[in-house]
Structures are given as structure tokens and as C-alpha cells.
Amino acid sequence: MNKENEDNNHGLRTALGLFYNTENFTTLDLAVFSYLARYQGNTRGNYETSLKILFKWCAQVNVHPLDNMKRPILELFARYLEDTRINSPSTVAHHISIIRRF
């Protein structure tokens, strides 16, 4: 969908690349927009990637990223990054630091 169609449909592409009608924004959508709005370029892209990984994992384990994100859940996510995605400890720390600020 091009920019003109987005404007005509009163829609907006979310920070994670999904097209939504602005009337259907969820609390999570708004949280993502407000969090990523302060960043640009590669930083924004890296932060989007971390959030995408988190949201995909949350969907797999049936955890809502805003309602249930407590330390034990973050610990499980860190183990997922390390054990399943085979991320290095520094990469895991990087993702967790981004998510903690979210």
C-alpha cells in the first residue's frame, strides 16, 4: 500500500511495519509508537528488531508484553535468546536492555 492510500484510508503503518486503521490502535501499538518515536536510523531499526523478537516469543508462550512482563518472564526470554536463538551473552544483554527501557 502506498503513502497516498494510507492517507486516504486514515491508516498508519505501525513502528513494526504493520498497517492499521488508526481507529484500531491497541495500547501495545501506542506504547511501541511512543517508545520508538524518540529514536531514528540504525538505533530505531535495532530497537524494532528487539521488540519484534520479544513480541513473537510472547505470542508463542501466551504472555502479553505489557501486562505480564515481570522479571521472571524476562529471565525466561533471556534463556530463549541464549538457548534457542543461540545469541551471545552480549547480544542477550543488548536485547534485554532495550526491552527493559520499553
Image: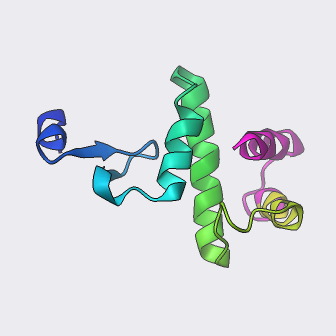
Which residue lies at the image location 75% right of the left edge and 65% below the top edge? 84
Which residue lies at the image location 46% right of the left edge and 46% below the top edge? 16
Q: Is residue 17 visible?
A: yes
Outermost residue on the top side: it is 41
Where is residue 76, by image quadrant? bottom right
Which residue lies at the image location 88% right of the left edge and 60% below the top edge? 71
- Quadrant containing the C terminus is top right
Does 11 sit above or below residue 42?
A: below
Percent x, y of residue 94 = 79, 38
- Quadrant containing the N terminus is top left
Q: Is residue 21 visible?
A: no
Percent x, y of residue 8 = 11, 42
Which residue lies at the image location 78% right of the left edge and 50% below the top edge? 87
Colouring style: rainbow
Q: Is residue 19 left or right of residue 92?
A: left
Where is residue 70, by image quadrant? bottom right
Does 72 sit above or below residue 42?
A: below
Q: How many badges with numbers are in the image?
A: 0
Percent x, y of residue 59 = 59, 71
Magenta segment includes 99? yes
Q: In the depicted view, which residue is nearer to us: 94 or 62?
A: 62
Q: Is residue 96 left or right of residue 102?
A: right
Magenta segment includes 87? yes
Find the magenta span and give its range.
Answer: 81-102
Q: Is residue 102 left or right of residue 97?
A: left
Q: Main secondary structure of the magenta part?
A: helix
Does 4 sit above or below residue 40?
A: below
